[in-house]
Image (spheres, helix red, strand yellow):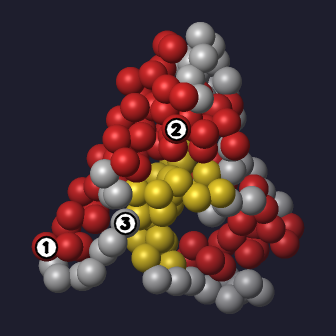
Amino acid sequence: CVHWDSRGHGGATLMMGEGAMASYSNRLRVNTRSSTETEVVTVDRYMPEILWTMNFLREQGFPVELSRIAQDNQAAQQLETRGRFSSTSRTKHFKNKVFFVKDQVDQGEVAIVDCPTSVMWADFMTKPLQGQLYKEMRARIMGCDVDYVDA
């Protein structure tokens, strides 16, 4: 999704157990040049929320080891886990965001995991899904039955 001012759209879903604990869907604050950059900027934008939630849960006595960030963009995964070793002249303009995410990966706070696009729950917030895929993602995020009908 691209807005009138050419800014992209990003979304995130914080999952805990079987449902969504929090969901976000916002226009990005900066213009991005590629889908890879959009993915990295989105992870960077929601990283403070992820870290705050992890620390809050730890302080409440819940054993939180690390958060898994599901990513369906292979290039973004490489940048977020390998940092400058995956960086080229085409990625220099957003390297600070890449390295903030990579620092969190290196510290063991988060892990970037591959997630097929067909089960990317955050897509529910940013793409116009239809049919069975919409029903499956709605059921997962809302914790309801796939065939749920509002009476």
Q: Earlier in the sequence, mark 2 or mark 1?
A: 1
Label placed on residue 2: none
Q: Earlier in the sequence, mark 3 or mark 1?
A: 1
Q: Secondary structure at mark 3?
A: loop
Residue drawn at x 61%, y 51% is 71
Q: What count of labels does the image hold?
A: 3
Q: Secondary structure at mark 1?
A: helix
Residue 44 in percent (x, y) is at 42, 38
- Label 2 or label 3, whichever lies nearer to me, is 2
* Nearer to the camera, 116 or 110: 110
Judging by the rendered image, the residue that carries numbered circle 3 is 66
Instruction: Look at the image and tell me in which quarter the N terminus lies.
Output: top right
Residue 3 in percent (x, y) is at 62, 26
- Give the amino acid type for the residue marked by disc 3 in the picture: Leu
Q: Is any atom of residue 114 visible in this view?
A: yes
Residue drawn at x 67%, y 36% is 75
Q: Secondary structure at mark 2?
A: helix
Residue drawn at x 73%, y 84% is 146
Whether residues under marks 2 and 1 lie with C-beta atoms below 8 angstroms apart, the answer is no
**Within 10 Å of the Cα at label 3, are there few (<14), some (14-19), or many (20+) other Cα atoms?**
some
Residue drawn at x 69%, y 43% is 74
Judging by the rendered image, the residue that carries numbered circle 2 is 82
Residue 113 in percent (x, y) is at 58, 58
- Label 3 or label 1, whichever lies nearer to me, is 3
Label placed on residue 59: 1
Whether residues under marks 2 and 3 lie with C-beta atoms below 8 angstroms apart, the answer is no
**Residue 17 sits above or below residue 58 on the image:** below
Instruction: Look at the image and tell me in which quarter the C terminus lies.
Output: bottom right
- Give the spatial CA distance, label 2 vs label 3: 18 Å
Residue 6 in percent (x, y) is at 62, 18
**Within 10 Å of the Cα at label 2, are there few (<14), some (14-19), or many (20+) other Cα atoms?**
some
**Residue 137 sits above or below residue 25 on the image:** below
